[in-house]
Each structure stands twice: as C-alpha cells, then as structure tokens.
C-alpha cells in the first residue's frame, strides 16, 4: 500500500458510495486506474466490505455506551463468544490497563441499555463491569 491507497481508503471512509469517477477526479487518477486499485485492495483483503453511515439524527436517537470488562483468568475466549451473541454489542476490543476488554454497546432506550449491561455483567467469566454512557459525540470519522 502506498500513500495513494491510504488517501483512497480515507476518501471511502468518508463516503463509501462515492462514484468511481468522483473518487478518480478527487485523487487525480483515471477511472480505470482507480478501479484497478480498488480491485487490488479488495482482492488483498485490505477492503473487506462497504458499510452504511447513519444520519446524525438516527445516531442521536440511539443510546451508546462503553462497557469496560474485567474477565476471569482464561475466560476471554468464552466471554468473547458470549458477547458476540448479544446483538446490542457492536464492537469488542481487548485493551491494556485496569480492564481487559471494552464493549461498544448501542440500544434504542435507557431500559434496553440497562438490560444489555445487566446481561453482560451476568455472563460467566465476567468478573466486573464499568459502564460509561455517551452523552454527545463531538465528531466522528
């Protein structure tokens, strides 16, 4: 990957539905060259798919939280598997520091968030949780 690939990826992260002709123009490439680069990035696994970016109004209507988890020794795989089955858990990351993992959680209401956080805390292998509800998003990329 070179600087041009990085710029292409950044541009796709802004708008994955941008027409190829627009992307080519923005990056100073021919349409054919841009399509070849996209195909190469997809074949190599750098780009594995395209996603939907929701409106600010939709995002504002959803409650977001970060749930930090402390996991019992040797239970990370089991906890990960169980969290994967909870649909409100959107992302799970392993981290350094006082917690072992951070789960990004979304819910449509406070009660749904409360239920999800309780469900996470009750999982076998989860020693304790600490939750932070997102009050506002200053910017996103």
Image (cartoon, helix red, strand yellow):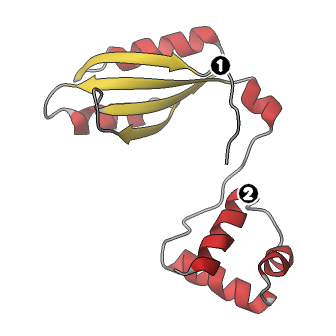
Task: Please tell me which residue is depicted at 43% across the width and 31% down the height of the picture.
Answer: 103
Q: Residues within 10 Å of mark 1 (few under 14, many from 20)?
A: few
x 62%, y 10%: residue:
110
Q: Quadrant of residue 124?
A: top left
Q: Position of residue 10 (x, y in %)?
A: 66, 64
Res 84 quadrant in image: top left
Q: Residue furthest left?
A: 73
Instruction: Relative to 141, say whether 122 is above or below.
Output: above
Residue that badge 1 annotates:
135
The quadrant in which residue 136 appears is top right
**Residue 125 x/y as whole percent:** 22, 24
The residue drawn where x is 73% and y is 31% is 59
Q: Position of residue 95 (x, y in %)?
A: 33, 39
Q: Is residue 113 above or below residue 38?
A: above
Query: Circle 2: is it few (<14), some (14-19), or many (20+) Cα within 10 Å?
Result: few
The answer to which of 86 and 99 lies nearer the viewer is 99
Q: Is residue 95 above or below residue 18?
A: above
Where is residue 98 drawn, in percent x and y? Answer: 27, 26
| 98 on left or right of 22 | left
Front-most of 51 and 101?
101
* Tally of numbered discs: 2
User: Considering the numbered disc 2 on the image, is that residue within a helix, a strand or a loop?
Assistant: helix
Q: Residue at x 45, y 29 (%)?
A: 86
Mark number for residue 14? 2
Q: In the rendered structure, which disc, 1 or 2, sits on the residue that comes first in sequence?
A: 2
| Observer-nearest of 111 and 129 | 129
Q: Which mark is residue 124?
A: none
How far is disc 1 from disc 2 in space, using C-alphas? Answer: 23 Å
Q: Identify whether 34 is placed above or below 124.
A: below
Secondary-structure class at tag 1: loop
């Amino acid at each position: 990957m070179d600087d041009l690939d990085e710029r292409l990826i950044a541009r796709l992260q802004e708008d994955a539905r941008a027409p190829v002709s627009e992307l080519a123009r923005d990056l100073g490439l021919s349409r054919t060259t841009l399509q070849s680069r996209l195909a190469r990035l997809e074949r190599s696994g750098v780009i594995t798919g395209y996603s939907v970016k929701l409106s600010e109004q939709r995002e504002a209507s959803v409650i977001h939280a970060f749930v930090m988890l402390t996991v019992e020794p040797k239970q990370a795989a089991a906890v990960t598997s169980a969290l994967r089955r909870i649909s409100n858990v959107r992302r799970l990351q392993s981290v350094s520091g006082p917690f072992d993992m951070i789960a990004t959680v979304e819910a449509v209401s406070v009660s749904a968030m409360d239920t999800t956080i309780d469900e996470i805390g009750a999982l076998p292998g989860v020693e304790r949780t600490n939750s932070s509800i997102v009050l506002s998003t200053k910017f996103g990329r």
